[in-house]
Amino acid sequence: MRITSAKFVRGIVCDDPILGDGKPQIAFIGRSNVGKSTLINSLTNQSGLARTSSFPGRTQEINLFLINENFYLVDLPGYGFARNSAGGRERIQELINSYLFRSHYKQKLTEGDLDMLHALVAHKKNVIVIANKIDKIKKSEYVKHMRKIESSIGGHTIIPYSSKSKIGIKEVSKEILE
Ligand code: GTP
Ligand code: MG
């Protein structure tokens, strides 16, 4: 795929409806000064798109860049910048965590779900997320809904399922039996 357009949409410092708009998000995560913002500029071939600096701690907000009008590249602040004040470091870490792990607008995972997921991951359990009762979701909302869940569970396999409508039975059998 070629990147044909890239533009800065906005920087956010807390939860924001844009995170739930259904467009996929690809986020760059890493320590301060490893070159995340520069990487976005080189991928999009626009040297001034994301602000960069030779000093760590340049990116302070979650910056969203709309690519080809249909997905976002997300430039996150770096973590672990020692010279940031302790308060500043905490604020940045909290911002990164809330972007990556908290529930965004209207998606249906609760804090409890996410706490459980993180505990399972911390104990190196294999996890499959089954989005059950999918028959309750309107067809027109389906893709948006699945993307919202996807964006909050961090790369785990997610399988839409309905015992009632017999959706996903084959897929779940395959995951657990093969
Ligand atoms: P934070 O916003 O603080 O998290 O930093 P960042 O990860 O966004 O780093 P940034 O893109 O601002 O780049 C940090 C420094 O590394 C800048 O001086 C860049 O010029 C330099 N840099 C980035 N990518 C490369 C690379 O591929 N090679 C070299 N040699 N330097 C790079
Ligand atoms: Mg940066």
Image: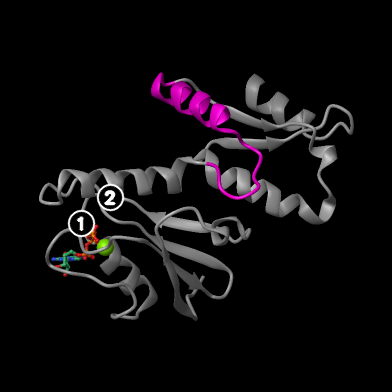
In the picture of the structure, the residue carrying the numbered disc 1 is 34
Q: Nearer the viewer, residue 72 or 99?
A: 99
Picture disc at residue 30: 2
Quadrant where the C terminus sits is top right
Q: Amino acid at mark 2?
A: Gly
| 19 lies left or right of 47 | right
x 29%, y 80%: residue: 48
Residue 62 part of the magenta-drawn span: no
x 77%, y 30%: residue: 170
Q: Amino acid at mark 1?
A: Val
Q: Secondary structure at mark 2?
A: loop
Residue 84 in view in this figure? yes
Magenta region, residue range: 103-124
Residue 133 at x, y percent in the picture: 80, 33
In the picture, residue 171 is in which quadrant? Answer: top right
Residue 31 at x, y percent in the picture: 22, 49
x 69%, y 54%: residue: 144
In the picture, residue 173 is in which quadrant? Answer: top right
Q: Indicate the colouring scheme.
A: one colour
